[in-house]
Image (cartoon, helix red, strand yellow):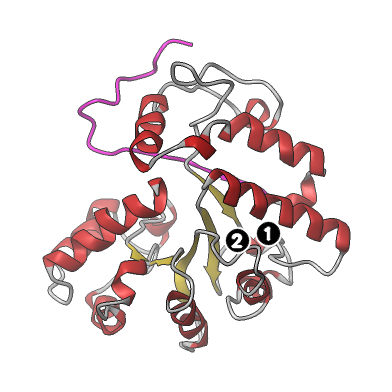
Amino acid sequence: MPSLFNPSGKLFEIYPFLGINPVNYSNGQIERLFEKHFTGFEHDTPTSRRKNLFEGMGKRHLDITTISENRGTAGPAGKVGCTYMFASVKLYTPLGFNPWPDDERELAKVRLIYARCLEKKIPITTHCSGGGYLTDPRGEDFSNPGRNRKKVLSHPDYQYLKIDFAHFGHQQSGATDWKQSILSYFRTHPNVYSDISCCGFSSGFYQSFKTYLNPSDINHFLFGSDFLINLLWIDSYNQYLDLFLSDQNLDEPAKLQLCNINAEKFLFG
């Protein structure tokens, strides 16, 4: 398919994540998803990962059926199918994704996802707040980073998974135990991150957040926007960005760390 736009000179680089809920797939279908969308990732360096993703940006015109089926369009030169369309895997707990199911058949599918992400050096972003599009009554429990996620990260096979806990464990009650669980992972797992997406709606948030930015933990935080969802609580995306950029609670080196240095390390290795 011809290029839909030339990415060179664009203000933003947009790298989609592939959402997977294993209860909707068989083991074979999960294998085919990784083969289709992540072929070649295991051979990447950080430089080649970014180059390959950038070359594919804006050159796909697919619907959800084409993404899910075992067919697609040409990727970057020398790449097959739809590979390098997605930069990461998204696991959304409010919809019923259980990080460590009791059912052995479902656990085998979840472990397959983790194994392929490790093998191919694919980062994982997982929902981690008390909010979200809750369709499964167990969703909030699945989102708790101190429960089933602990079983994952304490397992010797998965201690090096690269995982971003989105929304920094925000709890509507004001409790901080989810945040403390995430912070504890920072100190024992070098590949664990957390983002502050859909959080920064006032200077008060950044005043509180800066207390977590000690010299070691700042290497694990990402900015994150959650656009378009953040528009439910703010007038515009420009206002959301301006609050972050102009807020005096975070200095310029900290903002650069969250938006550039850590984000590139998370996405590209």
Mark 2–mark 1 distance (CA, rounded to whole Å): 7 Å
Q: Quadrant of residue 62?
A: top right
Give the total of numbered labels.
Answer: 2
Q: Which residue is drawn at 49% across and 32% down?
A: 85
Q: Give the range drawn in magenta.
A: 1-20
Rendered view: 27 above or below 6: below
Residue at 44% in and 55% down: 229
The answer to whether residue 132 is magenta is no
Q: Name the residue under label 2.
A: 133
Q: Tell me the kind of residue under disc 2.
A: Tyr
Q: Tell me if residue 7 is in the magenta stretch.
A: yes
Quadrant in the picture for residue 67: top right
Q: Give SS at disc 2.
A: loop
**Most prominent secondary structure in the magenta stretch?**
loop
Q: Earlier in the sequence, mark 2 or mark 1?
A: 1
On the image, the x and y values in percent for residue 18 come to: 57, 43
Residue 3 circle label: none
238 on left or right of 251: right
User: Which numbered disc covers residue 95?
Assistant: 1
Instruction: Check if mark 2's residue and mark 1's residue have beta carbons within 8 Å.
Output: yes
Q: Name the residue type under label 1.
A: Leu
Q: Residue at (74%, 51%) from the top-left corner?
A: 22
Residue 238 in picture, x, y percent from top left: 23, 52
Q: At which x and y percent is residue 19?
A: 60, 47
Q: In the image, what residue occupies the spot 80% across and 38% down?
A: 28
Q: In the structure shown, which secondary structural element does the residue marked by tag 1 occupy?
A: helix
| Circle 2 Cα neighbour tier, 10 Å, few/some/many (<14 / 14–19 / ≥20) | few
Q: Where in the figure is residue 265, as x and y percent of width and height?
A: 35, 53
Q: Is residue 2 left or right of residue 90?
A: left
Q: Quadrant of residue 11?
A: top left
Left or right relative to 104: residue 113? left
